[in-house]
Every structure is written in structure tokens, then in C-alpha cells.
């Protein structure tokens, strides 16, 4: 991920805004599992940097939610907000949070086009798709969360509703779709099976 974010600095960006914005959005998608369209719709009042909470609105199924973010993410967003204000000036609470070249609000198409230019540095072979997609960050976040819970002995079935709510799914069954059989999960599953039933 760090290599990918570093690659953002190579994007054509006359005033630096495009490169900085794409780097920040990709980091946000990776750390939060947001849908690719959700950062695009954030306005300044949606980003509570004091309490570390994002208000996600205008989303799939019109299901708004509040997403807590870590201190490191808060710091990155705080830095971005200060930096963009130095470029285009102080904005109102109803203005967009993320911007493109020339100080215009960025859109999803711009983020997707930029990602296509930088994703070649990722050493990944997606299953069922020719190339890695922005949406794959969301799948990875869900799978990594389940894997961490499994390692720590946390009951996945009992706590899946927490992840489901965080991701903005209508019901936990929708979250199960993300839980593909990654190599790490297969190893953990085999280990748990052997612990319970033994193995040769």
C-alpha cells in the first residue's frame, strides 16, 4: 500500500492537488473499507476530526452511517485539510472535502482513472478480474478483519454484525459475500479444525 501511495506522487498534477488528493483517498479506502464513491461525497461537516468520525451519507441503499477512524487517519485527513486550504483558501462546512486540479471537487471517474495509471506497481493477481480495482480495498479490509478476529479467538459469527454495520451493509448476510477463501484464512481454518478434531 505504501508503494501504491508513493506512486501517486508521479501522477500528472500541475498544482499538486490531484496527486495529494488521490494519495489521501487511497489511504482512506485502505484503512476504512469505504466504498470508492463514499469519500467523493464527503463534505467538510461530514469529517469530524476532533472526535475521529466520518459521517457517510449519499450512499448505497441510502443507508447513512458514522464510521470511526484511527488517530493516524485523523492526522492524515487533518494534514490534507490544512494543505488544501493553503492551496484554495478556507471553505464552508458545506463544501467538498476532496479536490482535483484547479480546486474543483473531485469525482469518482477521476479517482478511478488515476488508479488505473498507478495500480501496475501492485504485485497482486485478483481472482475473477483482469486488474486490481478500488473496490478490492473494501474486500481486503473485511477479510483482514475476520482474519485478525480468528487469530485473537474472537467469535466471528457473534461479531459479524459489527463489521456489517461498519461497512454499511443492510444485513450481515451481505458481509459474508466478502469473506473469500484467502490463503491466510485457509491456513487459519485448517489450524482451527486440527485443534478441535485433530489431524495427521
Image: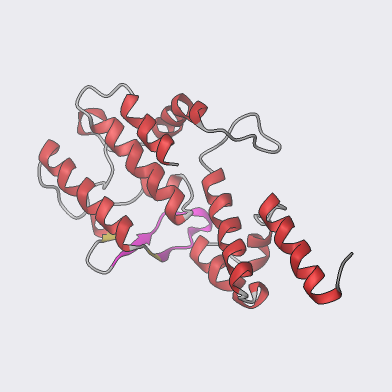
Query: Is any atom of residue 100 visible in this view?
Result: no
Question: Magenta stretch?
Answer: 52-66
Residue 11 x %, y %: 34, 24
Q: How is the image coloured?
A: secondary structure
Q: Residue furthest right?
A: 200
Q: What residue is drawn where x is 41% and y is 28%?
A: 114
Q: At 61% across and 71% down in the image, what residue appears? A: 160
Q: Nearer the viewer, residue 150 or 141?
A: 150
Q: Residue at x 38, y 37 (%)?
A: 5
Q: Is residue 52 above or below residue 1?
A: below
**In the rendered view of the protein, which quadrant contains the N terminus?**
top left
Front residue of this view, candidates 18 and 95: 18
State whether residue 65 appears in this view.
yes
Q: Is residue 42 left or right of residue 156?
A: left
> In this rendering, would 121 be left or right of 42?
right
Rendered position, 200 above or below 107:
below
Q: Position of residue 81 (x, y in %)?
A: 20, 48
Q: Position of residue 112 (x, y in %)?
A: 46, 32
Quarter of the image with the C terminus is: bottom right
Amino acid at each position: 500500500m505504501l508503494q501504491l501511495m508513493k506512486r501517486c506522487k508521479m501522477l500528472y498534477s500541475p498544482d499538486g492537488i490531484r496527486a495529494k488528493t488521490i494519495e489521501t483517498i487511497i489511504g482512506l479506502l485502505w484503512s476504512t473499507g469505504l466504498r470508492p464513491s463514499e469519500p467523493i461525497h464527503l463534505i467538510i461537516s461530514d469529517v469530524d476530526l476532533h472526535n475521529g468520525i466520518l459521517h457517510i451519507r449519499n450512499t448505497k441503499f441510502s443507508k447513512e452511517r458514522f464510521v470511526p477512524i484511527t488517530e493516524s487517519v485523523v492526522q492524515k485527513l487533518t494534514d490534507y485539510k490544512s494543505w488544501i486550504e493553503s492551496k484554495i483558501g478556507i471553505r464552508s462546512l458545506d463544501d467538498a472535502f476532496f479536490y482535483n486540479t484547479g480546486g474543483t471537487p473531485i469525482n469518482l471517474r477521476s479517482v478511478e482513472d488515476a488508479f488505473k495509471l498507478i495500480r501496475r506497481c501492485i504485485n497482486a493477481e485478483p481472482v475473477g478480474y483482469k486488474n486490481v480495482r478500488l473496490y478490492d480495498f473494501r474486500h481486503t479490509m473485511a477479510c483482514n478483519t475476520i482474519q485478525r478476529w480468528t487469530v485473537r479467538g474472537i467469535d466471528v459469527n457473534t461479531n459479524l454484525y459489527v463489521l456489517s454495520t461498519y461497512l454499511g451493509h443492510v444485513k450481515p448476510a451481505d458481509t459474508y459475500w466478502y469473506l473469500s477463501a484467502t490463503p491466510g484464512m485457509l491456513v487459519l481454518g485448517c489450524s482451527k479444525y486440527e485443534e478441535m478434531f485433530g489431524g495427521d
